[in-house]
Amino acid sequence: MEKSLQSSINQKANHDEGEVDANAGIIYMLIASFCFALTGACTRILRNDIGPIELVFFRNLVGIPFIIYALCRIPAIQKGGKFALLVFRGVIGTIALYAFFYSISKIGLAVAITYQQSYPVFLAIMSIFAFGEKLEAKEWLAVLVGFAGICMIFFPQISVSSLSLKSNTIGFSNAVLTGSAYLSIRGLRDFYHTKVIVFSFMAAGIVLPIISMVIGHYFYNPDFDFIIEKWVWPQWRDLGWVLLLGIAALFGQIYLTKAFSHQKTGIIAAVGYSNIVFSILFGILLSDPIPYLITWMGILFVIICGLIIAFKKKTPLLPKA
């Protein structure tokens, strides 16, 4: 009798602990989504004073001391042996940030974030060629729904001017680049510690902007402002926003990692789409244009696509690093 009672108590404790753990994962993901949306909002606020490439530089400059401290405090244990892929992850992730910050500065928060969040479409397709994965019928349906959503967002946006075409094309390319970056993480996870993968990303996010701005200083061309730009000294009024941008990005990364350690990947990925909701709210507060009705439908389609892919049996790797 006593053993049975004790067993029941233990089962209830484990159940309660599991519920707390799951709830913590969801809360962590909501915090991460808010932080990433806040990063975008800071970019939107600073767009008239500081270029997107310089903001990529500051984003990583603020965060990298914390990663270095973490590596020094507890050295990473890893196999190594995939250095070229590690460098590729850093480079492709940084270029994706170029496209992301550029699109925020040109087309607004809601649309730019939705473009980025459509990366599961491309990640699913690239996984077929990179890892030989097979998609089920519902996953192919998700890809088609997601692609339709992208078209609903993309085509109404480009009817205004060639500048709009350029900005939206770069925003759209962010999804492809982000998918490539996360695919490379999948190839690295068995060889390098998460902290080392994050470090490679942040280090590239400092080195590449410096190269871009040095080139921009001598050979600036406005047609290539998405890849080269001139350095502009931040004004005093901007320093607080720059610091907030870097800190928000850092905490977003920390809570994202914590979220995936507390809950199933599919559920966390689904909660991650709250990033779009937070970004829409920030966009409204910052007086971004209200999206067209068809754009709202596109945003909904992208979210539906992501949810379907998130809950597949073997979810493609999502941004843990």
Image (tube, helix red, strand yellow):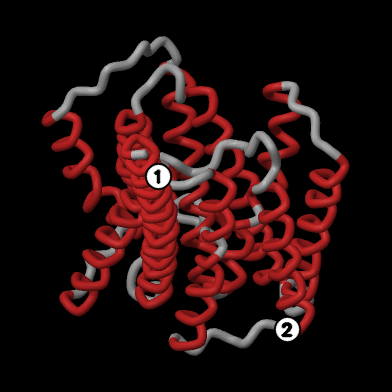
**For residue 109, side relative to residue 249 (left or right):** right
Seen at 30% across and 35% down, the residue is 199
Q: Nearer the viewer, residue 199 or 262?
A: 262
Relative to 166, is 82 above or below? above
Q: Quadrant of the C terminus?
A: top left
Relative to 163, is 308 above or below? above
Q: Residue 19, can we see it?
A: yes
For mark 1, give the secondary structure. Answer: helix
Q: Nearer the viewer, mark 2 or mark 1?
A: 1
Seen at 33% across and 74% down, the residue is 49
Gap between marks 2 and 1 measured at Cα: 55 Å
Q: Nearer the viewer, residue 214 or 37?
A: 37
Q: Quadrant of the N terminus?
A: top left
| Residue designated by label 2 | 292
Q: Position of residue 206 (x, y in %)?
A: 30, 43
Residue type at mark 1?
Ser
| Residue designated by label 1 | 8
Q: Splitting the image into 4 quarters, where does residue 292 fall?
A: bottom right
Q: Position of residue 268 (x, y in %)?
A: 51, 52
Q: Splitting the image into 4 quarters, where does residue 316 fall?
A: top right
Seen at 46% across and 47% down, the residue is 263
For mark 2, give the secondary structure. Answer: loop
Q: Residue 211, can we see it?
A: no
